[in-house]
Image (cartoon, helix red, strand yellow):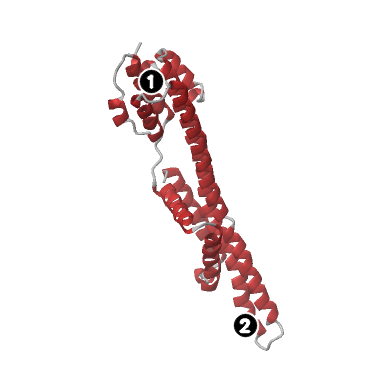
Amino acid sequence: MKALSIFGLLIAIIVVLVGMRLTSENMGVFFDWPSLFIVVGGTFAATTITFQLDKIITILKIFITHITRQDDFKFTTLIADILKVSEGYRKGESLESHIQNTKDPFFREALQLINDGVLEDDHLLRILEDRVSNLNYLRHEDAQKIRTLGQFPPAFGMMGTTIGMIVLLANLGGEDAIKKIGPAMGVCLITTLYGVIIANLGFIPVAENLTFLSKRNHLKNIIILEGIRLLLKKVNPVILTEELNSFLPPNQRLNWKEVIGN
């Protein structure tokens, strides 16, 4: 997970804990087994109804991968790699060595298709365009799945609140009504608290971050696609660099002189 994301998550957790501590010296009042069971168990149950088992496993993998992976991708590095490969291809060099050294899977796949020499240029580009579109759709679907999960904890938090209110109102007329009001209100409010925390510190931020990453990956693949198009035409390296720089803001553009010299 990116350092800033970890830092932000820690700040959020600290804010919640400090807020609890400032509210009450007894932190134990914020823990309730029935409330936790309702939110976590209900979220899991709703997830199994919404998605098939293999989809749930995929969602968990996406969630864990997003939290644990490092994100050090740079557009300038990508454009520099495309520029180097294009220059080699323009001079008649084999793509084999470039394929082995290319880290980006989509770029490596595109180079392999060129190196195989089976497809005509127009057909190859059309296939790559379809893959760019389909990959973007699949990544947005992954983000949407996590966002869907983010709807369940607050909903079951409200369910816990309703259960607590039913218990509270049902016992208002009893002899020991005063003793039961506290636990019932605890279930009411703590369940809602758990639902809000799980959704807003877990699923929703991850879903929004996945959406951002899917947009950035889509831009990356578009740059690769345009780079392959220019590579096949064997255009001048300066033209290739400036064409690809057009996708980026001025402060992120590559200076071609740093890669191939004057």
Q: Residue at x 35, y 29 (%)?
A: 112
Tell which residue pokes out farthest to the top in this image.
Answer: 262
Q: Residue at x 65, y 82 (%)?
A: 178
Query: Does residue 44 appear in the picture of this structure?
Result: yes
Tell which residue pokes out farthest to the bottom in this image.
Answer: 175
Q: Amino acid at mark 2?
A: Lys
Q: As rendered, which of 244 and 55 lies closer to the eye?
A: 55
* 2 and 1 marks in contact (CB < 8 Å): no
Q: Which residue is mark 2?
A: 179
Q: Which mark is residue 34?
A: none
Please tell me how crowded label 1 is: few (under 14), some (14-19), or many (20+) other residues with Cα within 10 Å.
Answer: many
Q: Residue 10: where, in percent of width, then height?
A: 46, 52
Q: In the image, is residue 105 above or below residue 237? A: below
Considering only order in the chain, which callout, 1 or 2, is on the residue closer to the N terminus? Answer: 1
Q: Residue at x 39, y 37 (%)?
A: 72
Q: Residue 7: where, in percent of width, then height?
A: 45, 47
Tell which residue pokes out farthest to the left in this image.
Answer: 97
The kind of secondary structure element at disc 2 is helix
Q: Residue 221: where, in percent of width, then height?
A: 46, 31
In this rendering, would 97 be left or right of 181? left
Q: Quadrant of residue 105?
A: top left
Q: Residue 164: where, in percent of width, then height?
A: 63, 73
- Quick one: quadrant of the C terminus? top left
Q: As rendered, which of 109 and 74 lies closer to the eye?
A: 109
The kind of secondary structure element at disc 1 is helix
Q: Which residue is mark 1?
A: 83
Query: Does residue 22 appear in the picture of this structure?
Result: no
Q: Residue at x 53, y 60 (%)?
A: 47
Q: Amino acid at mark 1?
A: Leu
Observer-side mark, 2 or 1, equals 1
Q: In the image, is residue 233 above or below residue 158? A: above
